[in-house]
Image (tube, rainbow, N blue to C red):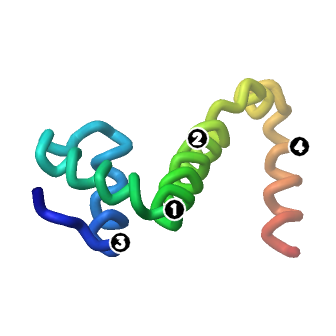
């Protein structure tokens, strides 16, 4: 099995999390994680950032904009542009 560097692990991280790595690469990736606490921490932070990013778009108040009077929405947007 080919040993991966931390840089290679970082480059493959997205595919690993999405489970898109071929089995041999996945095994090499996991072997690296078994001996590298820094990469484990990096991966956990990456996963947390992805989760938080997805949650940012799960706003249940998305219908608020539709219920605002157009004149109020326009006034708010104009005020924001001026600031």
Classed neighbour count for the residue bearing mark 4: other residues with Cα under 10 Å, few (<14), some (14–19), many (≥20): few
Instruction: Kindly identify which residue carries mark 1.
Output: 37
State the residue in front, 81 or 23.
Answer: 23
Residue displayed at 57% across by 40% down: 54
Residue situated furthest front in the rendering: 35
Q: Position of residue 73 (x, y in %)?
A: 82, 44
Instruction: Kindly identify which residue carries mark 2.
Output: 51
Among the two numbered marks 4 and 2 on one chain, the one whose residue lies closer to the N terminus: 2
Among the two numbered marks 2 and 3 on one chain, the one whose residue lies closer to the N terminus: 3
Q: CA distance from mark 2 to mark 3?
A: 23 Å
Q: Position of residue 64 (x, y in %)?
A: 80, 29
Residue displayed at 33% across by 74% down: 7
Classed neighbour count for the residue bearing mark 2: other residues with Cα under 10 Å, few (<14), some (14–19), many (≥20): few
Checking the image for residue 72, the label placed there is 4
Left or right? Give the position of 51 relative to 15. Answer: right
Among the two numbered marks 3 and 4 on one chain, the one whose residue lies closer to the N terminus: 3
Closest to the camera, between mark 1 and mark 4, is 1
Q: Looking at the image, is 14 positioned above or below residue 82?
A: above
| Local secondary structure at mark 3 | helix
Q: Looking at the image, do the residues carrying marks 1 and 4 touch, with CB atoms under 8 Å apart?
A: no
Among the two numbered marks 1 and 2 on one chain, the one whose residue lies closer to the N terminus: 1
Q: Looking at the image, is 3 positioned above or below residue 25?
A: below
Q: Looking at the image, do the residues carrying marks 4 and 2 touch, with CB atoms under 8 Å apart?
A: no
Residue displayed at 52% across by 67% down: 38
Checking the image for residue 6, the label placed there is 3
Among the two numbered marks 1 and 4 on one chain, the one whose residue lies closer to the N terminus: 1
Checking the image for residue 8, the label placed there is none
| Local secondary structure at mark 1 | helix
């Amino acid at each position: 099995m080919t040993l991966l560097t931390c840089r290679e692990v970082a480059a493959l991280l997205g595919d690993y999390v999405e489970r898109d790595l071929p089995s041999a690469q996945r095994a090499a990736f996991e072997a690296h994680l078994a001996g590298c606490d820094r990469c484990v921490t990096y991966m956990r932070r990456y996963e947390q950032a992805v989760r938080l990013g997805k949650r940012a778009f799960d706003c249940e108040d998305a219908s608020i904009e539709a219920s605002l009077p157009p004149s109020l929405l326009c006034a708010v947007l104009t005020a924001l542009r001026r600031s």
